[in-house]
């Protein structure tokens, strides 16, 4: 009897706890819903009443203060439309927003990644199409192609403001000192690697303890081998990963590893350590994201250029395609109570985020940047923008933006196995297919 | 005092707050985890009940190397008991016999236990660094270039490299426990032994160690369960890498839950670790008791 009661007590308590924890996850959504309700009730009485727009994002890193500054400015300028921002760490955000979307608990303004990530939301009718709002000149203010990745079935579903682009950073000083030509083809890259190796330098930087920096290398080589369309098709499960292009890309990465392109302790180096070594001028080449530009520029001012990744002679990719383009975007919830205000806010935020991030070297713009003082722009970011992004004919985001959670981790693990020479390129293709792309 | 212990109300009054705290913070979460471990759940959405499927995939057709991670943690437990504890015992016995600077040595050996594990991790990562690390520098200086290695990046050496750091860190901890045990033995017994003509070694072997049995039992339990639970230093130094060569159940559990969003499956790992620790604690206690009686 006694034990039964004790057990019931424990059970009761655990249910109580469970409901607590369950609630805490959704709290922002609930409070948003109640605020929305309150706001709409109020606006029926008095149209000048203050409304609140909820805005979820992943701004938890260093660019956060730029964003919050712009949001604060909006709030100061628009006393009646208050933006309430809520930031969550990047990976957790992906899961959180998906959950909220499926439960119809999403905020009014949604931060998202253009491309594959947003597609299911659009198909489920959860995102507001923006076409009718954009004919006021907004489209003219944006760069051509800026809306491509956020257009589904001919309709625009969001405004982009920042994009990623991979670039091969080369230390010109080291190239000159060692009489090496900056590579434009993969064979030249191998030659350069061997030349630097001979000179006693570690030719290329990569922090493979963190796994994703190595993945950037592989994804880039795969783009040169297969071209952007094939990569996107495979990521969308339309074609198999177990085919020559992806196997050859693994083969090419192995060739780099075999040629001694990377440090011998590459598997225990973090990305920060590898970038630090590049920034100290110890390593001549590094394939990384535009988000590394700021740090590199600060320490090696003027000695580094950002160039296109070399092409592969028998590959289907061309040098006008780049790894990146997986743009940050803002969308409006289709169920929001305040469509007009939310769209107005999204326009304001996207435009200002775009220019501020470009200026500080934190991102590449999606909006016209003619009005920005050229001399103040981070020079490497400018180079990436002008030489790699502008005039491009295609792009593929780093694969972990396309694949989520478990699949992204599996892909990174497989690439790391290539760095550690634990699987053959053939097995790499087979395993990628069987573990990630079962449906194809 | 005796009257106080006979007063049931007082006992209840004094132990209940701790009991409550313990229940809410330790016992209940274990029950939650047991519940989670029966779900297929990403941590955010609604989970689906899958029964014991998660436990099954830990052992049957396992693809994430859980079995290897258990083997790794067993190796750690083995060398903990076989190498770390003897060293601790030796140090404890020597210091407890009153060498000069007893306090100084006791403090020095205990320092690694006090320092944050992250700092210890950084320290050893610098020692193992293939470029400027102390280990390789010493090897080069001694003309042993062929033996230099990227210790933490090589799948053959990473596990040993991490384990050495872990053993090193906790030698002082076990030493202090044993030192306290050795110090609490009455000097009369030593005097009697000395009158009987026992040497220092004989005294240590036949007087000190047998009398320290209870504390040795505690040390073995701590060393074994500590090895099964080990996480922080491995996480800092290698994160389970390179290529999963230093993975132990806890690091695997961490990536499973927080990178792969498999809360249910990860919880099954957590429950396994708890069960493993409990079983080994009971077995070790049994063994020591048998030994004491026999």
Image (cartoon, coloured by chain):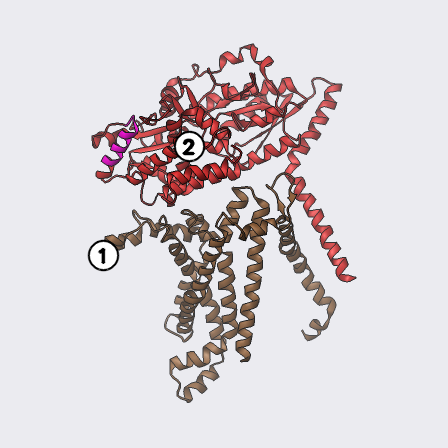
Q: Which residue is mark 2?
A: A243
Q: Which chain is brown?
A: B
Q: Quadrant of the N terminus of chain A?
A: bottom right
Residue B19 against residue A367 in the figure, above or below: below
For the residue labelled by badge 2, is the local secondary structure a helix, a strand or a loop?
Answer: loop
The chain under label 2 reads: A
The chain under label 1 reads: B
Question: The magenta stretch spans which residues?
Answer: A183-195
Q: Which residue is mark 1?
A: B142
Residue B88 against residue B271 in the figure, above or below: below
Q: Residue at x 46, y 51 (%)?
A: B247
Label 1 Cα neighbours within 10 Å, binned few <14 / some 14-19 / many ≥20: few
Q: Which chain is red?
A: A
Q: Residue at x 35, y 39 (%)?
A: A274
Residue B62 rendering spot, x and y as whole percentages? 51, 49
- Badges 2 and 1, same chain: no
Q: Quadrant of residue A258?
A: top left
Q: Relative to B208, is A170 on the left or the right?
A: left
């Amino acid at each position: 009897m006694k034990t039964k009661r004790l057990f019931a007590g424990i059970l009761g308590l655990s249910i109580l706890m469970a409901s607590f924890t369950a609630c805490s996850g959704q709290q922002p959504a609930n409070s948003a819903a109640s605020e929305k309700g309150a706001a709409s009730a109020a606006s029926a009485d008095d149209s000048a009443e203050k409304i609140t727009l909820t805005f979820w994002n992943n701004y938890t890193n260093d660019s956060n203060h730029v964003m919050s500054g712009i949001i604060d400015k909006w709030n100061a300028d628009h006393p009646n439309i208050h933006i309430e921002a809520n930031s969550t760490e990047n990976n957790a955000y992906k899961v959180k927003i998906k959950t909220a979307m499926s439960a119809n608990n999403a905020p009014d303004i949604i931060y998202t990644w253009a491309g594959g990530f947003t597609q299911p939301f659009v198909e489920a009718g959860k995102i507001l199409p923006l076409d009718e709002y954009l004919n006021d000149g907004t489209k003219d203010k944006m760069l051509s192609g800026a809306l491509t990745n956020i257009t589904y079935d001919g309709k625009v579903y969001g405004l982009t403001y920042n994009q990623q682009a991979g670039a091969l950073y080369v230390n010109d000083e080291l190239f000159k000192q060692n009489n090496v030509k900056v590579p434009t083809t993969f064979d030249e890259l191998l030659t350069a690697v061997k030349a630097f190796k001979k000179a006693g330098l570690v030719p290329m930087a990569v922090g493979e303890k963190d796994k994703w920096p190595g993945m950037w290398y592989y994804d880039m080589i795969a783009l040169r081998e297969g071209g952007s369309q094939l990569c996107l098709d495979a990521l969308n499960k339309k074609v198999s990963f177990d085919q020559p292009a992806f196997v050859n890309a693994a083969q090419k990465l192995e060739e780099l590893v075999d040629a001694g392109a990377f440090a011998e302790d590459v598997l225990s180096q973090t990305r920060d350590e590898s970038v630090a070594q590049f920034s100290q001028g110890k390593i001549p080449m590094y394939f990384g994201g535009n988000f590394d530009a700021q740090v590199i520029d600060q320490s090696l001012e003027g000695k580094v250029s950002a160039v296109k990744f070399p092409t592969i002679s028998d590959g289907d990719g061309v040098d006008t395609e780049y790894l990146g383009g997986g743009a940050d975007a803002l969308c409006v919830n289709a169920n929001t109570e305040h469509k007009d205000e939310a769209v107005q806010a999204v326009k304001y935020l996207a435009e200002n985020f775009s220019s501020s991030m470009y200026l500080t070297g934190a991102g590449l713009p999606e909006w016209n940047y003619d009005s920005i003082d050229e001399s103040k722009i981070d020079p490497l970011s400018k180079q990436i923008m002008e030489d790699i992004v502008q005039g491009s004919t295609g792009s593929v985001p780093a694969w972990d933006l396309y694949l989520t959670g478990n699949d992204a981790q599996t892909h990174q693990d497989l690439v790391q196995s290539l760095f550690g020479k634990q699987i053959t390129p053939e097995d790499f293709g087979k395993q990628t297919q069987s573990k990630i792309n079962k449906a194809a | 005092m005796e009257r106080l212990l006979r007063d049931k109300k007082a006992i209840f009054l004094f132990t209940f707050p701790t009991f409550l705290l313990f229940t809410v913070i330790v016992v209940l979460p274990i029950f939650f985890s047991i519940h989670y471990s029966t779900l297929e759940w990403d941590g955010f959405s609604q989970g689906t009940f899958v029964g014991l499927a998660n436990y099954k995939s830990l052992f049957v057709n396992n693809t994430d190397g859980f079995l290897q991670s258990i083997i790794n943690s067993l190796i750690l437990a083995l060398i903990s008991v076989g190498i770390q504890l003897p060293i601790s015992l030796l140090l404890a016995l020597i210091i407890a016999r009153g060498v000069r600077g007893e306090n100084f040595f006791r403090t020095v050996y205990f320092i690694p236990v006090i320092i944050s594990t992250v700092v210890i991790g950084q320290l050893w990562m610098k020692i193992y660094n293939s470029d400027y690390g102390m280990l390789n520098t010493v090897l080069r200086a001694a003309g042993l270039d062929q033996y230099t290695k990227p210790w933490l990046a090589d799948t053959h050496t990473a596990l040993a490299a991490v384990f050495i750091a872990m053993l090193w860190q906790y030698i002082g901890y076990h030493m202090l426990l044993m030192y306290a045990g050795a110090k609490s033995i009455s000097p009369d017994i030593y005097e009697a032994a000395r009158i009987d003509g026992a040497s220092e070694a004989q005294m240590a072997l036949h007087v000190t160690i047998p009398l320290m049995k209870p504390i040795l039992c505690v040390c073995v339990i701590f060393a074994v369960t500590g090895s099964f639970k080990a996480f922080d230093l491995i996480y800092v130094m290698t994160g389970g890498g390179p290529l999963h060569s230093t993975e132990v159940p806890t690091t695997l559990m961490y990536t499973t839950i927080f990178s792969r969003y498999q809360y249910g499956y990860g919880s099954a790992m957590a429950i396994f670790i708890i069960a493993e620790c409990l079983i080994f604690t009971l077995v070790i206690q049994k063994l020591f008791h048998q030994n004491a009686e026999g």
